[in-house]
Each structure stands twice: as structure tokens, then as C-alpha cells.
Amino acid sequence: MVSKFFFVPLCFAMVGSNCSAQKQKTNVPIINQEVKTKTATTNASPIIPAAERLNEYLPLLKGKRVAVFANHTAMVGNTHLVDTMQKLGVNIKTAFGPEHGFRGNAPDGAKIETTIDKATGIPIVSLYGQKNKPSKEDLKDIDVMVYDIQDVGTRFYTFISSMQLFMEAAIENNIPLIILDRPNPNGFYVDGPVLDPKFKSFVGMQTIPVVYGMTIGEYANMILQEKWLSKEANEAYQKIIASRYSEGAKFFQLTVIQCANYTHQSKYVLPVRPSPNLPEVQSIYWYASNCFFEGTAITEGRGTEKPFQIFGHPSLPKNMYQFTPHSTQGAPNPKFKDQVCYGWNISGTPEEVLKAINNRLQLKYLLEAYRLFPDKENFFRKDNGFNRLAGNDELMKQVKDGKTEEEIRASWEPKLSEFKTIRKKYLLYPDFE
């Protein structure tokens, strides 16, 4: 049963019965993981992503012209969401694709062109390239918008930025938005520096920490209700609220279809790699800590079999772990392609990696890499990329000044605790505390 609260243009789907479509074979890149089941949870019941709970949202799409923002992670069993919905008679007029494309086969940062999906014949509008937000023309014949993309719970993973812009378009065009929620594989802790608004970019649009501990549905409601959207979207939303009693009015409303059996203590193992350079859950766990290397001279491990678990540089000491990045489908031109590098291999089993991370953003490898790097003047990129990832210019100064990890962590307060208080208001699932 879907609960709706009609007195404001916002509603949430409550946990109900599970229903899944007939499973078909697909060419989705499966995550490199020995675990056969797709979830690991703290209770006996398997986690069910919202997309598989068809009975909860198909009635909301009946007779409607639908736009879907999705990628290869939007799966119903072994079948893509759009393929499933089209087979069940949903009238999908347009689909939108994010970074890596609608079917998820484009490398990091590759510009995606608007095209026609070969499997369904549906027009695919790219929101990563020439534009990152649906236009009024894109939505002129749309009655309802649907979002389903797997997130990994870090501020600089760009799908939350894409979701925000998609929601702003829904509000500005007064079209209902349904978010099919998915578990957050890093949703069991909150940590990191909170973004300074001066460093707002597509890899950090909100004043949140690096690891924010929310599902995409929880996050969407937070930025809506806290008025963290664009000025235009916030103003449009207030007008919608003010006119909600107008007879026959069409309202934007946010509907979050919840996952079943998920809590913020769950350790969710993704059945599909969320992007080309996150091939297994261990890389997803280390991503929050080691993505900072993207803003430095250090290779973050693209072009190896374990990105974000293997990292280093040709000029680091030769007695360290040795590896050589090569061209791969997800990283055609990685840093130091075909060059011998020296650094770290911190891979292990999921359990070993979780123990090493210990529910904290780990800075020790960043600090040690800087200490060992011979050309410190050129350790950080000159394009401000590191500061965009950090969400401030303080972390770079702290690293250069030789601050300890604990000294750096102390500087994240009180903003980190203030965010945790805000976060609590919008949780849909039991918390880890």
C-alpha cells in the first residue's frame, strides 16, 4: 500500500509486498565479487530495492506519459527497469542518461551524445555532456518523471548532482517525481569535511560531508525540505505549496518508493558495478578515502584490476608495491599508462576492508603519499581539482603543513555534527546509531 500525504506535494511509499518481473539475460557488467547473493544484511530477510517492488509504483504510472532517468544499475532482477516497464505496458516517452551513459558502458568523464536506445527504440537524452538538466522541451509531453540510479554514498560521486538537477527540472515544470530508492553501500557511517559553498561544483553541490550516510531518496527529501535547491527551484516549490488547494491544479510531488528490509546497518553488496572503475565492493568502500588522489599526481588505480585499492606513482620508493596501469574499457588512458608505479595495494576481503576503514574516512595514505613524494611542489594538481573533491582549500593546506589525521579530523567540527543532526530528520530507514 502506498501512503500519500496530499496536504503537501510530498509523499513516501511505505514498505509493502514484493513483486518482481520475469527475469531475462542481459549484458550488464556484473560486479566482480565472489559473493553469490546480491545483498548482505544484518537480518535474515534479503534487501529488496524499490525497483523490484513493482506493485508499489506501477499504479502511479498507469495511463501516464513517463520520463525515466536511469543507467545500467536500474535493474529489476536481471532485466533493466526500462525493459521491464515497457514490457508491462508503461508508456515511456523519453529516457535520460547520466555519466557513463544510459546503459553504463562509457568511460569516466566521456561526453555522451543524445541517441536512440537500440533495445527499446526510446529516445535517450544525455544529461552528461552538452547539458546536465532536462529542458522544458524535453518534458513537454511528460506526466511523471522516474529516477533510478545506484549511488555509492559519497559527495563527489556525481549521480547525486544529476538527481538534484533532475528534481529541479521536475519542480520547475511542475511534474511529479518518483524516486525508486536503492540501498547505500556506504550508508553505515557519516564522516569527512563538510563542503564549503565557495567550492560548489558538479562533484560537490551541497554542504554535506564526503560520506553522508543516506539513500538517494532520503537525500532528495533533505535537499528539498532544507531548501538547498537552486533559487528558481526553491521559488517554484514554494509557489506549488501555496497553490496546493487550487481546484484541478497539477502539482509536483516527490514520491520515494522505499527499499524493503534495508537499514543503515546493512552491508549491501551491489549486484552490478555502479561505474566502470568500481568493479567490486572493496573499491566502493575505499572510494571515499582514496578518490582524493584524483586531485593529485598519484594514480588512484585506474587501469588496474582494483581501482582505489591500488595506487601510487613512478617516483615513489622502489621497495614499495609495484604495479603497471594499462588501458582498460573503463580507463582507456589511465595515469602512467604502461609505466611501472610504486605504492600501495590495500585490497582484501570485504570484511578485511571494512575492518581497515573502521567507519571512518581514512587519510593516512594521502598523508603518507605526500610525505614520500619527492616533488612536493607538483603533488597537487594545479587546476583546483583537489579542493573541489575536498570541498575546501583547508585540507590541502593541512596536508602541506604536516598536520596529523586526528588534527585534521578535529577541524571538521562542529559542521560535521551539525549535518548529522539535519540528516536524522530525513531518514526513512533505521539508523546505525
Image (tube, rainbow, N blue to C red):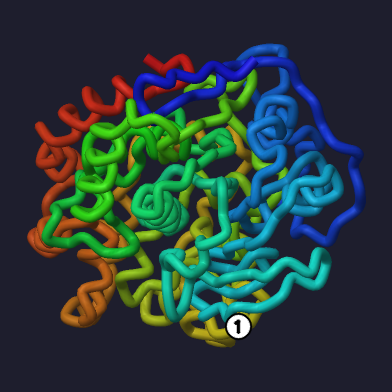
Q: Write the residue at 58% across / 64% down.
A: 97
**How far across and down, in percent of the image, does residue 328 sit?**
66, 77
The residue that appears at 26% across and 64% down in the rendered structure is 201
The C terminus is located in which quarter?
top left
Name the residue at 21% across, 74% down.
384
Horizontal and vertical percent position of residue 115: 66, 78
Q: Nearer the viewer, residue 313 or 81?
A: 81
Q: Which residue is disc 1 drawn over?
A: 332
Q: Is residue 230 left or right of residue 9?
A: left
Query: Whole-percent x and y of residue 40?
Result: 67, 27
- Looking at the image, is 403 positioned above or below residue 27? above
Q: Is residue 316 left or right of residue 146?
A: left
Count residues near mark 1 (Cα–Cα under 10 Å), then give few for <14, some for 14-19, many for 20+.
some
Tell me if residue 212 can be seen. yes
Q: Is residue 312 visible in this depiction of the protein?
A: no
Looking at the rendered structure, the secondary structure element under dot 1 is loop
Decide which of 382, 304 is in the foreground and name it.
382
Relative to 48, is 77 above or below?
Answer: below
> Is residue 279 positioned above or below 341 on the image?
above
- Total marks shown come to 1
Quarter of the image for residue 124 reads: bottom right
Measured along the vertical axis of the image, is residue 129 above or below residue 339?
A: above
